[in-house]
Amino acid sequence: MLALLLTGGNLLLGFLSIGLIMLPHAVGWEVPRLDVAVWCIALAGVLDAIDGPVARRMKSTAVSWGREFDALADLVSFGVAPVVLLGVALPAALRTTSTVIGALYVIAGAWRLARFLKQSPSAERGQFTGMPITAAGLLLAAWWLYADATRGAVHPGLTLGMVAAMSVLMVSRIVYDKFPEFGVHDRRNAVKWVIALSGAVAIAVKPALTGLPIALLYAAHGPVRALLSGAPSRIGHQDGRVN
């Protein structure tokens, strides 16, 4: 039940993010508070990181449709919400282009989530196929936070290019490392914990300035490793997600 509540919180935050952008007058604001909407997406990412480990530890009481519920929540919070956010942040002259590219991003995210649901729940330990939609959505949110903190405009060309790149990476078969897992005791997972905790501290101190570089490094490590290995890496027929 606790895992379902966390997933429900993820979904609620994604819905609130969209509502704050599209219906600011409903909460008495004259203009959309994009900063609050971005933090809703970021907090949804925290809940999404927690619900997986909680579900595994309480698997005796888990419901059979938990994965499906989690996938729907992720599609709203990290698929639809970031696209709505960036659609508002970009110039009105690019509305048609941003709508088309944003729609492709949402479809790519749904494709990846559906592929995950189709496969076995037991993905290869420590890795998964394709960039997770959670990481893609948080990267786009971090991009807006960085532009806001540096008082710079969200560059339209770079933004649309980034959205398109995330779409390709989500449907790709490039192997990404999972975040560190609880209960796994090996050197690789220990290194992941050191990196993850160091990144978490950096983000806690300067979230708007450090979130984007960390998100970009995570997005790039899969393609870079695939290029260095001489061929795109893949995990047989299995798939996974950020837990």
Image (cartoon, rainbow, N blue to C red):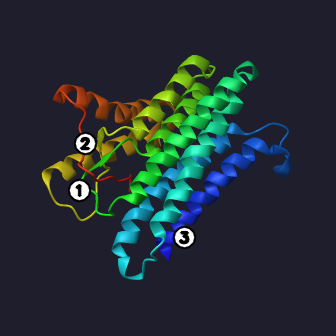
Q: Quadrant of residue 105?
A: top right
Q: Where residue 178 appears, x then y in whole percent? A: 31, 49
Decide if residue 25 is on the left or right side of residue 151. Answer: right
- 63 is higher (above) or lower (below) than 176: below
Decide if residue 103 is on the left or right side of residue 237. Answer: right
Residues at marks 2 and 3 touching, judged by CB atoms closer than 8 Å: no
Query: Which is more N-terminal, label 1 or label 2?
Result: 1
Q: Residue at x 48, y 30 (%)?
A: 209
The residue labelled by disc 2 is 234
Foreground mark, 2 or 1, reads: 2
Decide if residue 130 is on the left or right side of residue 228. Answer: right
The residue labelled by disc 1 is 125
Name the outermost residue toward the bottom.
Answer: 60
**How many angstroms separate mark 2 from mark 3 (CA)?**
33 Å
For the residue labelled by badge 1, is the local secondary structure a helix, a strand or a loop? loop
Q: Quadrant of residue 227?
A: top left
Q: Dot 1: few (<14), some (14–19), or many (≥20) neighbours within 10 Å?
A: few
**Residue nearest the viewer, comparing 117 with 138:** 117
Foreground mark, 3 or 1, reads: 1
**How many angstroms separate mark 3 from mark 1 (CA)?**
26 Å
For the residue labelled by badge 2, is the local secondary structure a helix, a strand or a loop? loop
Q: Name the amino acid type tagged 2.
A: Arg
Decide if residue 22 is on the left or right side of residue 42. Answer: right
**Residue nearest the viewer, comparing 1 with 238:** 238
Q: Where residue 230 appears, x then y in whole percent? A: 18, 26
Q: Residue at x 77, y 43 (%)?
A: 22
Q: Name the amino acid type tagged 1.
A: Arg
Q: Where residue 197 appears, x then y in whole percent? A: 33, 47
Q: Quadrant of residue 121?
A: bottom left
Q: Name the amino acid type tagged 3.
A: Leu
Query: Which is more N-terminal, label 3 or label 2?
Result: 3
